[in-house]
Amino acid sequence: MRKSAAPLKRIDPPPYDRLVKQPASIAVLRFGAVGDVVLTAPALEALERAWPDTRVLFVVKERLAPLVAHNPDVDEVVALRERETAASLARRLQERNVAAVLDLHGKLRSRLLRALLPRLPWVTWHKRDLRETLAVKLAHRPYRATMPFADRYHAAVEQAVERELPRGRLRYHPGPDDVAAADRALREAGVDPTRPILGLAPGARWETKRWPAERFGELAARALAAGLQVAVQGTEDERPVTAKVCQGAPGVADLTGRLDLAALGGFVSRCAAFVSNDSGPMHLARALGVPTLALFGSTDPGMFEFTGHRALALSLPCAPCSFFGRSSCPEKHFRCMLDLGVDAAWGALQPLLEGGRRAFVSA
């Protein structure tokens, strides 16, 4: 944590959606998910530069707390407990004398929390324009993001401080224990963490965000033949997917279910390159400067910044068809992923393997 605690005083609130000049403390709300929490890093850095004496409390689901535990721009992590009510969380924030709220969650739960803290000024982010939402949901048009999500977080910070700010960098900060835990898991799986590793993340919550596991296996087999160590990771729920990868490429180290969220960051930090669907591990890899190949189907890579990395997505009349992903292809053909071949992925991966670590960018 970056600063020692200081006595805090409650402030008189100005109008909603406008904060006072440099409050003594501010609660930043982003309860989930993995990628969304990681993407707040540039905004947190911008906030720290603008208000260096303001105490920053980051409010996040308890299971995701490791994602911000070592961020130098956060003073305290307030973990939202499982099944905790908004009233309980509001009381805990009041006990900490929180003076303002920056809502980077922007959903029903955070709105209810703000309603329970009526004396506090707040600013909230806007995930997308209404016209984008209506075009996709009502007119069934492909979704094209008009602004990267990290830029929208940054815009909320600028609204809070009432001036333009330099962009922060997308960075992730694993702890030393996180790397040590990952190294133990790698060695137990027969992988030398000091030698180049290609990391694979073939899972994703939604079916239409998953490149076929068999193709991950083919890609892994090529990497093994080229002399790379290859390790696949996933949760226990993703074991059927990671098993297909391992079946297609004997010699792949299987870390499925062996890494908690903290150790996942340690593992990704050890990789020479990383291949992933549009999922939380993809954001971790970019935030660690690990050269990342991201495979997109039903979602839009324009939501994120890929300078120094590579996103593969096909230009189809029906894609990208959703904001978050779908359980099945609405057109019944799934061409956005099935037409994305291993040759294209291997060709995109080569320069990433040769280029070394990437500079940290502002999205």
Image (tube, rainbow, N blue to C red):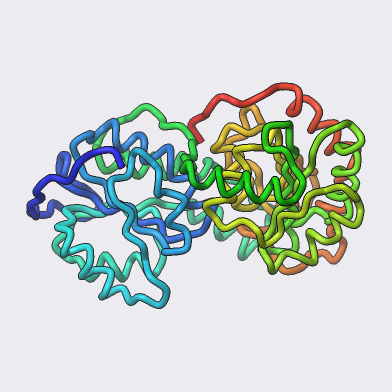
Q: Quadrant of residue 3?
A: top left
Q: Nearer the viewer, residue 310 or 261?
A: 261
Apparent side of residue 83 relative to residue 235 in the rendered image (left or right): left
Q: Quadrant of residue 108?
A: bottom left
User: x, y percentage for residue 88?
Assistant: 26, 74
- Viewer-side residue, 154 vs 350: 350
Left or right: residue 3 versus residue 71 is left
**Residue in the image at 26% along x and 65% along y:** 114
- Residue pictured at 71% horizontal, 55% vertical: 255
Who's the residue at 14% across and 62% down the image? Answer: 119
Q: Measured along the vertical axis of the image, is residue 229 above or below residue 107?
A: above
Q: How many discs mark residues in the rendered view?
A: 0
Left or right of 350? Residue 114 is: left
97 up-or-down from 160: above or below: below
Q: Residue at x 38, y 51 (%)?
A: 125
Residue 361, given in percent of the width and then of the height, sits at 52, 29
Q: Position of residue 337 (x, y in %)?
A: 82, 52
65 or 27, which is in the foreground? 65
Q: Residue furthest top?
A: 355
Q: Quadrant of the N terminus?
A: top left
Is residue 100 placed above or below 346 in the rendered structure? below
Q: Nearer the viewer, residue 5 or 121?
A: 5
State the image quarter where residue 324 is shown: bottom right
